[in-house]
Structure formats: structure tokens, C-alpha cells
Amino acid sequence: MEPNIRNIAVLTSGGDAPGMNACIRAVVRTGIYHGRNMFGVMQGYQGLIDNNINEMTARSVSNILHMGGTVLKTARCLAFKEDAGMEIAFKNLQDRHIDGLIVIGGDGTFTGAKRFGEKYGINVIGIPGTIDNDLYGSDFTLGYDTAVNTIIDAIDKIRDTADSHDRLFFIEVMGRDSGCLALRTAIASGAEAVLLPEKETSLKQLITKLKSGVTTKKSSSIVIVSEGNKYGGAYDIAKSVKRKFTHYDTKVTILGHLQRGGSPSGFDRILGSRLGYAAVNAIIKGESMQMVGLRGNEIKLTSLEEALHAHNYKLEDDLLEMTHVLSI
Ligand code: ADP
């Protein structure tokens, strides 16, 4: 017999990612389709503590599918890390008889959800939403595909100006400890080199590569720097390279938060819809402490424990080698 989960809340937490709105829409409408009462929590865990929780209808999520960001807003909430904060959050849910919680976010969000679920026995399902694509149990996280496309679009524009002036550009992209975003965008934009957190690339190697570009008459060079790499940010690397490599006018672009914004790609709209739909179906079947993810084009559940502690992204050496070969 199916457990009687009647009232389900959804929140977005941590870093926002394109596709979150498509996902919220899917969660709310799937729940309503199954006769559940659906609630939207504003500003992540902060809204649970502040009792900023609103009942949602199918119309509350009209016309949001194509929008970046999150209509439920997101926040980093330190109070939720404290037992006292969690207690208030639980009481606010209890007052509304909410017995299921769906959280959309990254590893911090899942850590909070896991603690909360263990402590109070509420059914919790996580949906991977982060542009970094760094969660175990899903081949793709929500927002990653859009971010790849946003970055490529920006690099294409930088390439135009780099080419016109014989410039060397260092472009810093997000990804925290994962070079997934950096490696993919380096391939798709034809970057001359990429510096990744997982891989030691010496400055000497980098300079050799750039010099060979000069010899083979490249009119511009683009180096993608992943924010988590060991030499520091793009500015630090540009400074070190400039001292030894005077051929080009050197410029730095930090893409920053524009990487998080924009209308979600078709892929992220579909992924958000699939994950939201699957999360509700799982929670009403009584699943808890699980993350819904996409693996080999199938929806699979992974325990929050595993999603948090296993390592998803193993840098593909063949892709790195290919990047090197294709940029001669
Ligand atoms: P992300 O989910 O994108 O990794 P954060 O790391 O900022 O983003 O985490 C989002 C939120 O999750 C935090 O602001 C906090 O409210 C909650 N959180 C993170 N770690 C914990 C924890 N150990 N216990 C309880 N809540 C946590």
C-alpha cells in the first residue's frame, strides 16, 4: 500500500541554476495531478525557518518554464545548520501537515536535507541543481547544459576581439572543484589550453603550448581557467605567463555570475521537467533520503549519502588529450 504523503513542499537552495523553474513547475503540477497539496517555500531553508511557505496551484507555475533563476528564490541559510533553526523549520512544516519535502540544489542543500530527514523522519527527496555538474548519481545536473552554452557564447564573442588584436585571453569559468564545465567549454570553443583543478599543468607546459601557437601563426589564443585550479585565478596565471611570454597583449575575463543566468536550454527544460516529475512520483511512493538523477537517459534514485560522498566526475583524460590535439 502506498504511504499517505498528502502535503508536499518544494524549495530551491544554494546556488541558483537555469532549469530550476522548469523543475518547480513539474513538481507542483505532478503533485496536483496526483491530488496532493503542494507548497512552495521561499528562499530555501530560510523560508522554512521564517514560515515563508505558500500553497501553490497549477497556475502558480504558469509561464515560468522558460525563465532562468528560481521563482521560489534561493538563499544561503546559516541558521538551518543549527539544531534550533532546524527545530523551527520542522515545527512550521508540522503546523501545515507537510510530510514530504523536495529540495532542489547542490551538495550543501543535500547535506542539510539529509540531516533534516534523519532528525525528524520527514520524507525528503533531492533534485540535483547546480551548473557545476559535480554530484554523484546523475550524469547531468540541472543548469549545467545551459551554462556550457552561455560560456561558449561568451567565448565566441571574446574570440572575435582576441583575433582582431592578436591577443591572449585568459577566461575564468566556474565549476568549484570540478573541471567538467571548463573542459567541455574548452572543447566547444576551440580553446588553445585549459587549466583544470584535477590536473597538474605546469606553467612551463602552458607557455610551450602558447609559443607553438605563435610559431604556427595563430592570431589569438584562448586559455580557459577553471576557478578551482591550483595556480589561483585567471589574473594570477595571466600575470605569471605575461612575464615570460611577451608576444601577445594579455587580457583576462572572469565570466562570473553571467554563467548562472539566462533562459534554460531545451536540455535543461526537459531535464528539470523529468526530475521534478520523478521526484514527486518517488516521494508519493514512500521513497525518502534519495536523489533523483539521470543515468544513461534513465531516471535513477541514488541515496543522498552516496550522492554526497561518492565522486561523480572523473576527468576524462581522452577528452583532455583531444583538446590538446585539436588546438594545434
Ligand atoms: P549548494 O546546495 O549549492 O551546494 P550551499 O553549500 O550554500 O549550496 O548550501 C545551501 C544551504 O544548505 C546552506 O545555506 C544551508 O542552509 C544548507 N546546509 C549546508 N550544509 C548544511 C549542514 N551541514 N547542515 C544543515 N544545513 C546545511
Image: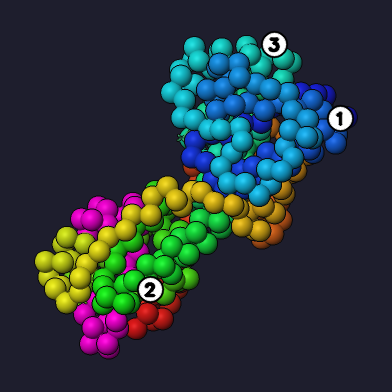
Can residue 280 be seen here? The reply is no
The residue carrying mark 3 is 95
The stretch of residues the image draws in magenta is 209-237
Q: Earlier in the sequence, mark 1 or mark 2?
A: 1
Residue at 27% x, 60% y is 252
Q: Relative to residue 111, is residue 223 depicted above or below? A: below
Drawn side of residue 253 relative to residue 62, left or right: left
Q: Is residue 143 above or below residue 288?
A: below
Q: CA distance from mark 2 to mark 3?
A: 58 Å
Mark 3 neighbour density, 10 Å: few (under 14) some (14–19) many (20 or more): few
Find residue 35 and name its label: 1
For label 1, count other residues whose C-alpha is less than 10 Å away and answer few (under 14), some (14-19) or many (20+).
Answer: few
Of tags 2 and 3, the one toward the viewer is 2
142 magenta-colored: no
Residue at (32%, 58%) from the top-left corner? 253
Q: Earlier in the sequence, mark 1 or mark 3?
A: 1
Q: Residue 24: percent from the left, percent from the top?
A: 68, 38
Residue type, numbered disc 3: Asp
**Residue beneath label 2, please?**
160
Instruction: Name which quarter of the figure residue 54 lies in.
Output: top right
As helix, strand or loop, the secondary structure at mark 2 comes to: helix
Q: Secondary structure at mark 3?
A: helix
Report whether 273 appears left or right of 324: right
Q: Is residue 258 visible?
A: yes
Q: Are marks 1 and 3 in contact (CB under 8 Å)?
A: no
x then y, percent, for residue 257: 42, 47
Element on which disc 1 rests: loop
